[in-house]
Image: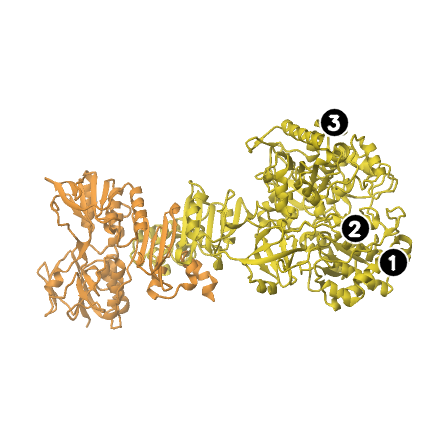
Chain colours: A yellow, B orange
Amino acid sequence: MNALPQHPPAVRTTCAYCGVGCGILARPDGQGGATIAGDPDHPANYGRLCSKGSALGETLTLETRLLHPMLRQPDGALAQATWDEAIGAVASGFAETIAKHGPDSVAFYLSGQLLTEDYYVANKLMKGFLGSGNVDTNSRLCMASSVTGHRRAFGTDTVPGSYADLDEADLIVLVGSNAAWCHPVLYQRMLANKRARGAKIVVIDPRRTATVEDDDLFLPVAPGMDTALFSGLLVHLADALAFDYDYIEAHTTGLTEALVRAREIAPDLAATARAAGIAEADVARFFDLFRTTQKVVTCYSQGVNQSAQGTDKVNAIINCHLVTGRIGKPGMGPFSLTGQPNAMGGREVGGLANQLAAHMDFSRDNIDRVGRFWRASNMAQREGHKAVQMFEAIARGEIKALWVMATNPAVSLPRAGAVRAALQKLDLLVISDNVASNDSINCGAHVLLPAAGWGEKDGTVTNSERRISRQRPFLPLPGQARSDWWIVSQVAQRMGFADAFTYDSAGDVFREHAALSAFENNGARDFDLGALAALSEEQFNALDPVQWPARAGQPLGESRFFADGGFFTPDRKARLIAPQPPAPRAATSAEFPLTLNTGRIRDQWHTMTRSGLSPRLGAHLPEPFVELHPRDAEAFGLSDGGFAQLTTGYGKCVLKVVLSDGQRPGSLFAPIHWSNATASSARVGELVTPATDPLSGQPEAKATPCAIAPLSFAFRGFALARHKLTLPDGTWWSRVAVGSGSGLLFASNDPPAAWRACAAAMFGADVELAEYVDEPRQSVRVAAFVEGRMVGCLFVGPAEAAPQWDAVKALFESEALGDAQRRAALSGKSTSGLADPGPVVCACFGVGLNTIRAAIESGEATSAETIGVALRAGTNCGSCLPELRKIASAAKVATTA
Amino acid sequence: MSESLVIIGNGMAAVRLVEELAKSALGRYAIAVIGEEPRLAYNRVLLSSVLAKEVSRAEIELRPAQWWRDRGVTLLYGQTATAIDADIRRVKLASGATLPYTKLVLATGSKPIRLNVPGMALPGVLTFRDLADVVAIEQAAAGHKKAVVIGGGLLGLEAAYGLAKAGADVSVVHLMDRLMERQLDPRAAMMLKRAVEDKGIAVHLGADTTGIIGTDRVEAVSFADGSRIDADLVVVAAGIRPNVELARSADLAIGRGIVVGDHLQTSKAGIYAIGECAEHRGNCYGLVEPAYEQARALASHLAGRDGAYHGSVLATNLKVSGVSLFSAGDFIGAPGTEQIVLSDPGVGSYKKLVIADDRLVGAVLFGDTADGLWYLDLIRSGQSIAAIRDVIMFGRALAERSPVLAA
């Protein structure tokens, strides 16, 4: 007999989350799920995964998926449509808009979640055939300042180093990066270096995050003042004669201007410490460490990028590496840690409004070159609108048709409230996504296109160290879902560009992309995949992770840039940049006395449409919160665990208050993940200033002047249900994934009696409702059961004694409950470890069947009489004696049998 | 030489008294037990189970003959005591014999109340109190299908359950607006009604019986509202009355029952009363638990120790018709008290705890009675439950694990 293989082969693919780009082994279970493990052979992670990556298996549900094309009907409802109809609607919509209002009246807003192949086709359609540069991406919110900083300094958007440098460095400086939570696998790599080789770690961040260990040097920099600190460092290196003059001489220009400006900003140690808001001794220690350690890597992330002066911050950092020649050598270099799984791929494709394609800008030569390669009929001639400006142009009515792919701008963009209003003004809003509902879709999208999800996608992504890895499908495409490159190609063909969009596979697209990168390159551009342009379909499918450059005719292998210069500027020299003096774009005021910093938490990703599906991830920090220093809390009348209303010039949020000594006084921190789909009033993007970096267009997401005030709710509670519950208006709530259902944590001023009244309607008619009511204590707990299984519950109590849900969640997630569990279900307490006495036999003394059997098994009792001696059962009214006798004799039979 | 101790009544109280005395004062008394019923003492609580044929008659015997012999007890069952001469300390038996005593204990129990309505003497109108009643009911039910039980208290429901199990078509008629109103609050009573009805028993509340109709034997029961229910058999279970006739013959103080003090002593020295016939501090109890407590206290007193009885916190803890019930203390909830309620109708469970000044003062449990005794202890001890209020409803195991108590 031929048995089916017990374990289908694991598919090698790449994680869906951050820019570390970890390799994953996914083993489908044949039922739509898969077990997930780290790929021990992938050079990004060598088998390690973080909490988010490990939980990917919990996010493969089809429950929230968009499975069919949908079209908005005249009556306002969305109705299922065929692909033919949907593609027709998009193609004619864009064509008509362009015909009426010109090419710049349309735009694509893309995402670092797209694969390179998807990105490439979308970018090609807009810039080569629709004739507009209006292609931007949520990567604008993520690393645009790094891109611009790189291009200013190196002439191209080049990450000079490799992850291996983190293993070899003797000093790792983390600037604006909570790597422990946001790039956990790389952080573990840094820690391994620290433990094994004694590498020092310096963390520069306004708040003390999980990244800071006790023996690290922590520099709590004032918001936005990184440039002051690195200007001070440049001055210090100059004054201490620590420059590498040979390197500077041979490979850089601009030292004089850069150093003069640095001296203006931070003339000496004391001035640096003052400007940066850090103790002088700590600044001195940092300067000494940097000066005396040759092998230093400076990693930076959103704290640097998401700033109105983000590009200057990047260049202030790069300056210090260039003047010491510490770049492109093992264990040395500036290192941008990318946020998204394929932000790098998007940059390579040129899916940004200020790039054309394949690391080429909108110069006349490049437009001509790319136009010839694409045989493009209608090349864009100039840069398009960057993200924030794109949505401003939509609000002004200049852009009338928008296609959003794989992102949720109504949540993630600054001033998200205004973004929502803008989306609603569009003549045509097309959204390709894999979820059926999110805040952006709910802004009145006209066409919904079901895209492939992680696990179904087929193509490539590039991680922070320029390493291209395959994302391979291990699940079938569900419903009508299709790859994004296919969807865009179909629309392009329908619009009359069939010849240029005849791809049959992701491999077809990749080969063209690789060929473009090598087209008339000859070493003039950093980005070159010429060696991969002729991969066969089999070779593409089997492609191992590969770092670029991969120039045709040159050996593949790990590579670094710029150890010996060779920058991609006309004179092949790097530029030392003189940054603008640092200052926050908007100062705090009496009305908005605090500075709002935004960021991420360990176990969630972006707007939670994926990570929010995992019960395991939801358990970490289930409620949207604002973190602040206890001193500020006292000043503003806030208490730990209470609620606060945050108000900026752009919007309002209500968040839970978390006090932390690690928070810098005067500064608030709020995570960005929650949306209208997951919380009542926690779309933090709504609070954020639309101010952007003048060079990169990246928003100032971490320094918005903000007011805070306490808000109190008399009652707190939670609800669990198999379906998504909706709570009454005025309730503060946060939705949390739980096993086979959905959970809500909430706060309210409605009395428990009102909640009790609505509980029955919440769980439907065909359930058994159990209730616990302690009216004097204002405590109400309701649970719904079907066939012994808890299918829902609602617990409400006074805010100062809020019900805890852990034990109840465990019951909700389990199968049919045992007697003891059901009895205690509404206690909110765990029954584990408690003896289950079983059904009562002796009512007088409350002795249960299990207790009696245990006494018999232990030999303590053998008859009704000795049961009475041991347990008192049957010694009062005696009405259970006949039953006791039966139990005793049944036990005897059992033991003799 | 041993003092002679005579116990009149061979019921559950008498058995417990002998048991306790044998433990604490063995040999001090020569004990004689006089019992009217011609059999060894049995467990009256199980009569309905016998009727329902769930247990045999032999199985409800409390102690075998050997047990009595081992304790040197003279058993005079099948004998009726007719009078007491307290002056000369003698008990007269129906047989004509007299029995001298040093100490006399009256444990004569109670008898069913018969309604003061026409037709009560008709054949087919029975009571439900002892094994003889069970036999009579069995015989009557065998040939007849329709049975009406008058009284929706504990006894009536037990009789109804037994009859239904024996195959009769049973209706319970009850004067009050809810079943077992002395032991249950309205909600528990409602659940009980449903549970009883689920067993095929019809329940009529607010039914004021005006007469038993029939010529040669019972044919129907009539009610104040003019309605009637056909009946081949009527079981009257409308309450009990202490048996006090014998005590009256000795000129003992009588209220509703035989008046006793905290040492269970009647108005005359050397004569005691326990169980359902006794009236202590104005209370006559109709349950086994107080009788046992009285037996224990009296045994201690008779053994020369300081055994005093201070009354029972009324607790009903029983299985009616296969349904577990418990109630104790102020289970209704007087004004000024607070209530916590847990109900899970899906598993037939309802619990109410009544709290006053952070103390548990009452409880009614339906279905899940496992913690009844614990609640009773808490009611009796009057200790503060403030620290465990949040979990007290969920039972002792959970409450005692909770760290607030450990602290």
Q: Nearer the viewer, mark 3 or mark 1?
A: 1
Q: Position of residue A58 (x, y in %)?
A: 60, 44
Q: Amino acid at mark 3?
A: Ala
Left or right of B370: which side holds A184? right
- Closer to us: A545 or A161: A161
Disc 1: which residue: A256
- Chain letter of disc 1 in the image: A
Of pointers 2 and 3, the one earlier in the residue sequence: 2
Residue placed furthest toward the left: B96
Q: What amino acid is labelled 1 in the image?
A: Thr
Q: Residues within 10 Å of mark 1 (few under 14, many from 20)?
A: few
Which of the chains bears the disc numbered 3? Answer: A
Disc 2 residue type (three-letter): Gly
Q: Chain of mark 2?
A: A
Looking at the image, residue A70 lies above or below residue A419: above
Q: Earlier in the sequence, mark 1 or mark 2?
A: 2
Residue position for label 2: A149
* Spot occupied by residue A862 in the image (x, y as percentages of width and height): 37, 56
Q: Secondary structure at mark 2?
A: helix
Between residue A813 and residue B360, name the one nearer to us. Answer: B360
Q: How far separated are the C-alphas under marks 1 and 2?
A: 19 Å
